[in-house]
Image (spheres, helix red, strand yellow):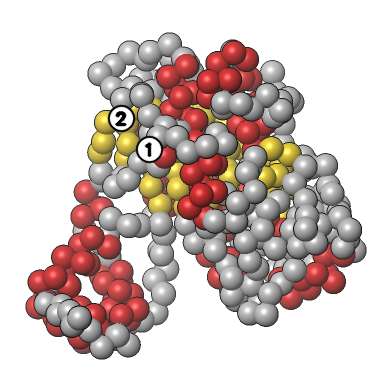
Amino acid sequence: MTQFLTRRSALLGLGAAFTLGRASLALAAAPTQGRLVVILMRGALDGMAAVAPYGDPALAWLRAELVPGAVGTEGGMLDLGGFYGLHPAMSQAHALFQAGELLPVHAVAGHYRSRSHFEAQDFMESGADHRMTSGWLNRAVLAMAKPSGPEAALAVGMTTPLLMRGPAEIGSWAPPSFSRPDPDLYARIAAMNQADLVTGPAITEGMRDRGFSRTTLADVEKPKNAYAFPALAAMAGKLLAAPDGPRVAALELGGWDTHAAQMQRLAGPLGQLDAGLAALKANLGDAWQQTAVLVMTEFGRTARMNGTKGTDHGTGTVAFVAGGRVTGGRVLANWPGLGPDQLLEQRDLQPTMDLRSLAKGLLLSHLGLSPAALGSVFPDSEGAAPTTGLLRT
């Protein structure tokens, strides 16, 4: 069947594409002075690239070309205590580590063993072993006393992640800039479709009808600000810092699915995460001392480098906990090793901690949920005990 694409439909398609950004933000009110921020890294972060266990002799054998330069060299890893090194794109996060406000947690994974992005993200956000229509963070807000104000939650952006969906009421607000994307985004869409005999000419003509010049259409360089994440993190900080503002936030950042050319591709999203954490802290101001941040991804990536100098879907990875009261300046890990007989199914980093344990630890010690309430937030999770010692008392 032959399909025809008009200039009008091309423009409508462009309009739809603008709502599918790489970052979003949702916020919720809660009857507490403690703030909790959860950052979802969609696409599966390679934890051994973000926090490289350079002290394990098997690392170089498995993926020498994916390990950043040695600690102390120009552009090399940033030391995390003698065994682990932080990716050089995360210099501001390293400053948090040195200040005792960042805690990397290694060899961590969800309670599921799926390598499907969609299935794993559903389980990570629902916090259950089966599909649910609500997320564990929404249920955590519901488990606390109902906050004052007309709305229990506020979503900022075009989408609300499953993590924040559920019985707690959600309001919505989109910043005006979301309706006015940068011209370089149009240029990237045109470049991406240029080779297609149907969509290429239709999109190009549609953009010309909107007044775009040949120079703009020919500009295929990657823009400097490819992600909106730092701006949304800054907005989250401002809203959370307000005395009568929300107390719970969920942010999303994509770009982690590095099947090929990982060394070149990973620095961008890691740099955006780094800038976002710094912007969040700066805009929280004094409220940073009352804030805990949990950064997590749906699963890790293979221990071995693949044939295209990337990594494939794996299991164990790294998570981060940050904040003014976090017992940071160390790496929390029960390191399983990278030897052939130590890898999960001889291909993945063996997980030794459950993501739900980290989340439970923060909900219990930081937001004050009761042990009984944790059972409703994370159904059938008796085997995942809350992690203790994440925060200074």
Whether residues under marks 1 and 2 lie with C-beta atoms below 8 angstroms apart, the answer is yes
Q: Position of residue 298 (x, y in %)?
A: 57, 49
Of 113 and 336, the residue lying toward us = 113
The amino acid beneath tag 1 is Ala
Name the disc covering residue 199, or none: none
Q: Position of residue 314 (x, y in %)?
A: 66, 58
Which residue bears the numbered disc 2? 170
Of 232 and 22, the residue lying toward us = 22
Of 349 and 279, the residue lying toward us = 349
Instruction: Determine whether, in the image, residue 215 is placed left or right of residue 4.
Output: right
Quarter of the figure with the C terminus: top right
| Residue under the point 77% across and 42% down | 352
Q: Position of residue 44 (x, y in %)?
A: 58, 56
Marker count (numbered):
2
Q: Is residue 39 visible?
A: no
Q: Nearer the viewer, mark 1 or mark 2?
A: 2
Residue 197 against residue 273 in the figure, above or below: below
| Residue under the point 38% across and 37% down | 26
Badge 1: residue crowd in 10 Å (few <14, some 14–19, many ≥20): many
Q: Quadrant of residue 323?
A: top right
Q: Position of residue 140 (x, y in %)?
A: 49, 23
Instruction: Determine whether, in the image, residue 313 is placed left or right of residue 227.
Output: right
Badge 2: residue crowd in 10 Å (few <14, some 14–19, many ≥20): some
Residue 160 against residue 2 in the figure, above or below: above
Quick one: SS at disc 2?
strand
Residue at the front extreme, as displayed:
1
The amino acid beneath tag 2 is Ile
Name the disc covering residue 26, or none: 1
| Residue under the point 80% across and 62% down | 346
